[in-house]
Image: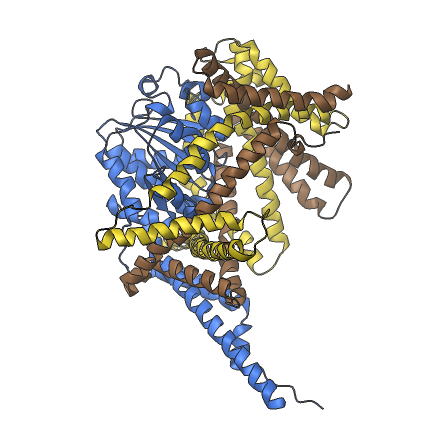
Amino acid sequence: MEKVQKPSFIERFLQLDRRIIYTLVALAVAIPLLFPMGLPIKVTPEVQSVYDMIEDLPEGSNILISADFDPASMPELYPMMKSVMRHIVRKHHKLAITVLWPNGPNLVAQCIEELKLEYPEWTNTVDYVFLGYQVGGAIVIISVGDSFSDTFPKDYYGASTAEMPIIKEFNRLGQADYMVMFEAGNSGDWWIVYGTEVHDVPVGGGVTAVVAPMYYPYLQAKQLNGIIGGLKGAAEYEKLTEVPALATAAMDSQSMVHALIFVAIVLANIFALMFVGQKRRQAREEM
Amino acid sequence: MQFIRKQFPVMLAFVMGMMMFIREFVPAKFSEQLYYGFTDWAIVIVGFSAVFAILSLLHHHMNKVRKRAQGYGYSIITILAFIQMITLSLIFSVRPGTPGGWEYQWLFVPMQATMFATLAFFIASAAFRAFRARTWEALALLIAGLIVMIGRVPIGEFISPHLSTFADWIMNNPSMAGFRGIILGVALAQIAIAVRIIFGIERTYMGGGD
Amino acid sequence: MLNLAILLQADNGLLPWQESMASFFFSDGMVAIGTWVAAGLTLFMFSFVYKDNPLFRFGEHLYLGISAGYLMSLYFFNNMKPKFFYPLMPFLDAAGDTTLNLWVIIPGILGLFIIFRLIPGWGWLSRITFAFYIGGFTGISFPKVLNGLLLPQFYATIDAIPWRVNSIDSAVLLLNSLVLFIGALSVLVYFFFSLEHRGFVGGVSRVGIYTLMLAFGASFGYTIMARVSLLIGRMQFLMFDWIGDEIVGRIASLFHGG
């Protein structure tokens, strides 16, 4: 009868049960949340550019935000949107907010309510207008180039936009001094092609990490003035605005999981090479 | 009737395409009115198409229930959830502070967020099991991935500032070159498809609809 | 008419009864119930990591239904009401600031043609709508993509190359810009399948492949970051909002007498 060879350590490692991997990932997330390490966060030039733009604009400048994301991207984009909006409120800029993704408006409403608790003097229809969601994607972007009030006859709360004090001075994309778009997909491409390039408005991008690499060509071509990429970008902006929050708290967990996956991939590749070498040696010995 | 079914849409696409293309080079008030008038109408049309998408989904689930197909019980859950949500939201809207808003915050958001959060487990498992540098190309992908993965988080900067420098260099040079090539290719393809649509060579966008 | 009035009132600013309703849904009790429901559904969805099961299926289909209802109401309130119904029937607008515009009948009819796809034998009408919309939009996008995407990106690729090198910094800039120029060009060559990838073209194409591999590697690193961020978000909710506040917090308040 043939002897059944016990799998070697290398084979057992390479065939590690996925539930062990899942458990290690969960622990790598949970432990740093309970016991923060406080790893330092370095601010990258791309994020600094967005911050500097908002910081250096004269008080009362018009800024458009487009929050084009949904709950699936909320952990990354919500903290950065809140940080940027807090910065805009502190600098007393005028703010108009649009949403191109249908599952996003309530998230923006929640952010506005949280900021109003911090800054109760921040007034709807005077300091900001939340225009809400409109169907159409690129068509909406073209339309806001003409008029916010025609594209959004009612704001998110159901009030008529045409007579609002803020709309009398800031009623189309071309009147924006700056724009920040929060993107979970490719609607950022549409904003650049149909919006900011047409009306010559500088724009910064707050994007999820999945799509961040795709926006770097726009940054190099100066079609974007800066990129806040992923949760790390959100943590950098929180550092700049000196209000550490969800993103900063998540950085240690982020680091641990990345380190875990890095070590796992490197070990798997090393062991795979050793396994191949082992098999070749066995084959030669049998010959 | 054949003319309206087959030839008329192609002619309409040509007329609309040429009209909107030529008006780009006509600096007149009428040209601007045409541009924004089209977008106003397009927003109404897209609204109807969005409603169609939802009705299509419901149609699919109602068919499943009617035919007692496998898993039709779950389709009943979908239909009931839709009916209660649409009723509440049409009466009270879906803003925070309404029943629809409450459901959005405590049912919809957690479920959608969690669906995508589970991907973290799968990506870690897949990376461990399948990410092997068997070829030179795979090795290039692996090295770039590992450097960016560790260099772009605080632990990478903590281990060595050179890691984040390498990660920055990869993002701002070869990675950007690759994605620029993709963007240029996509832009060229978009232009080519636009010409094909306007001249009626490409008609698949019309769908069957018989 | 009364139901229609309620239908259209719901989105016209906060009325007193709506303010009372808002206070109820933001009360501690409703937030607590919501947290428990959200935690339960989160665990249902996470159960898929182990294997597909009825709890996950229930959550998935519940999510579909709620999502469809939410989206439908959004399309009605944000799009159809202010952009179609009010311009046709301005008396419906309680705020009274919509003017009559009968021209919206035309896009309305075109929109209805799309919905006719659900009716057997009438679906062909949707071709007219698609021809109108897609034809018009491609006419708009042609010059916009050329001016807003293609030309700026080409220009930026060439403009990055410094034509004079007189320091270490400009030498590094030259090197980086050549990586960018050669990389972008070689990727375009790689995607040009009308030419056989042999000889010189094959060589350039191989450079394109390696450039793409570096780009996708970077993208992979960032994708890991994105997915892990989403997991961290859910774990923060489960650990702090649910276990921390609702379980441990309430037990602790019992011991401290409220």
In x, y percent, where is residue A191? 43, 33
Asked if residue C38 lies left or right of residue B76, the reply is left
**Residue at figure coordinates x 29%, y 25% from the top left:** A127
For the question of whether residue C240 can be seen, the reply is: no
Nearest the viewer among C217 and B195 is: B195
Residue B185 placement (x, y as % from top left): 51, 42
* Location of residue C165 in the rendering, given as x and y in whole percent from the top left corner: 25, 50
The answer to whether residue C178 of the structure is visible from this angle is yes
The answer to whether residue C232 is above or below residue B103 is: below
Chain B rendering hue: brown
Does A48 appear above or below A136? Answer: below
Quadrant where the N terminus of chain A lies?
bottom right
Name the residue at 60% across, 19% down: B15
- Applied colour scheme: by chain
| Figure chain in yellow | C
Q: Which chain wears blue?
A: A
A200 in relation to B77, above or below: above
Q: How many marks?
A: 0
Question: Residue A282 vs residue C14: left or right?
Answer: right
Q: Is residue A8 left or right of residue A81?
A: right
Task: Looking at the picture, tell me which residue is in the foreground, B94 or B206.
Answer: B206
How far from the left and from the top, in percent, is residue B1? 77, 18
Which quadrant is home to the C terminus of chain A?
A: bottom right
Which residue lies at the image location 50% right of the left edge and 15% below the top edge? B34
A190 and C68: which one is in front? A190
